[in-house]
Amino acid sequence: MGLSVSEMQVGAIYSESMMTIVDTIRDQTRPNQMKFVEFLVFLCRIAHEHYLGTGYEPELLYLKLDHLMPLFLQPLNLSPIFLFGEKFAKDEKDERKRAKARQKKLNEAQKKHKETGEAIDPNLLK
């Protein structure tokens, strides 16, 4: 599925997401069923675990879920109806860093063009 969470971790996360079941004798299927709130907790824990130890770990949980929702729905051939579409702060920072480096190269090429008349690489203009 593309998640960096092992099956063993998923089992533990499932158990941790379940609320205490008072009577398992009357309804023996209850441990295999999740209430809606338990399911939401499960999704949040999976998202947290997936990004644990990455550069995205400090990101807000709703963004982690937003980025993982298409991955969660893909096996069912579904797509999310709504996504926030916001980028991670880390990705935005990386993009700014790359843009700054491209601008620096372009400035150097323009300076060199003025001094020597050498043509500017068209790839720098993209």
Image (tube, rainbow, N blue to C red):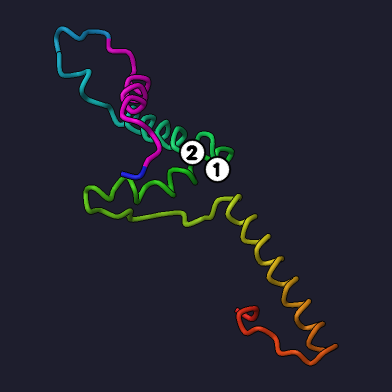
Q: What amino acid does circle 2 point to?
A: Tyr
26 or 50, nearer to the observer? 50
| 33 relative position to 55: left or right | left
Residue identifier under label 2? 51
Residue 105 in picture, x, y percent from top left: 73, 73
For the point 58% across and 54% down, the residue is 91
Mark 1 sits on what residue?
56
Where 91 falls versus 6 (above or below)?
A: below
Circle on res. 32: none
Confirm whether the magenta stretch covers residue 30: no
* Occupied quadrant, residue 99: bottom right
- Density class for disc 2 (Cα within 10 Å; few <14, some 14-19, many ≥20) is some
The secondary element bearing badge 2 is classed as helix
Asked whether, in this view, residue 81 is left or right of residue 125, the answer is: left
Real-space CA distance between mark 2 and mark 1, rounded to the nearest whole angstrom: 6 Å
Mark 2 and mark 1 in contact? Answer it, CB < 8 Å: yes
